Amino acid sequence: GQNIDQPTEMTATEGAIVQINCTYQTSGFNGLFWYQQHAGEAPTFLSYNVLDGLEEKGRFSSFLSRSKGYSYLLLKELQMKDSASYLCAVRGSSASKIIFGSGTRLSIRP
Amino acid sequence: GAVVSQHPSRVICKSGTSVKIECRSLDFQATTMFWYRQFPKKSLMLMATSNEGSKATYEQGVEKDKFLINHASLTLSTLTVTSAHPEDSSFYICSASIIAGGPGNEQFFGPGTRLTVL
């Protein structure tokens, strides 16, 4: 079976840093994705990790440890517009299919 | 980046009617398209994988006779919700993939279709 876990909700302060964790158990592994989704809109791609380590892209960074089945998304210098749901998704043994976690709703307070 | 469109963006229909949703890749050819549904405050649930010219592969628990998928060309896939009922009300999102199994962000999402069944 496949299981992707992440916290349901998080709250952080504008200008601060927040880390959203994701653990996964899948049959096979061919990459982990993070997406951002604002209410009523489609997901937008943030990051992709297939090898262990940290990938940095501006204010957002994503980390992967394949041996631990663990990833995190790090958001720095938080802005109010970062209030959204953040979806962890894994491509397992299937060549193309991506399975999504339940998502983490992040609220940013002034 | 690649653009995926969906039509309609919103649809309201009566219970028992059928609704067709189109997903188009506008500036690339999609070898594979995916259909997801999303309930309020929930994550995306993969319904089926659609490959051009072949039958769709449905996820466990998704009724293939209820949700008909046609991938007639490399730029168009359609999802038809047959005999819709209020419990089918949801946000339906498609995504398109250029190269199956490739790295990075090659799966591009459409803007979604909000279906409300009265």
Image: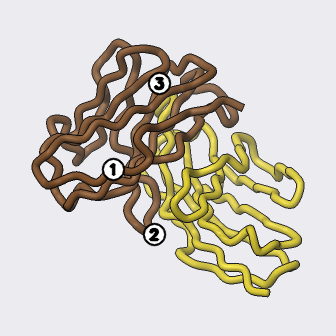
Chain colours: A yellow, B brown
Residue B7 shows in the view: yes
Residue B37 point in image, percent of width and height: 38, 51
Distance CA(mark 1)–CA(mark 2):
20 Å
Residue bearing the label numbered 3: B32
| Left or right of residue B45: residue B111 | right
Q: Residue B17: where, in percent of width, then height? A: 14, 45
Q: Nearer the viewer, mark 3 or mark 1?
A: 1
The numbered mark, 2 or 3, whose residue comes first in the sequence reads 3
Q: Nearer the viewer, residue A53 or A39?
A: A39
Image check: A101 left or right of B3? left
Q: Position of residue A87 (x, y in %)?
A: 58, 58
Q: Residue at x 68, y 83 (%)?
A: A11
Query: Around disc 2, counting alpha carbons within 10 Å, would you say few (fewer than 14), some (14 to 19), or many (20 or more)?
Result: some
Whole-Å distance between the Cαs marked 3 and 1? 25 Å
Q: Is residue B110 above or below residue A12?
A: above
- Residue type, label 2: Lys
Q: Is residue B100 above or below residue A4?
A: above
Q: How far is mark 2 from mark 3, CA to CA? A: 27 Å
Residue B11 image label: 1
Q: Which chain is mark 3 on?
A: B
Residue B41 is tagged as: 2
Quarter of the image for residue A81 reads: bottom right
Q: Relative to B51, does residue A97 appear above or below in the rendering?
A: below
Check contact, mark 3 vs mark 1: CB within 8 A: no
Q: Nearer the viewer, residue B55 or A109?
A: A109
- Badge 2 marks a residue whose secondary structure is loop
Q: Mark 1: which amino acid? A: Val
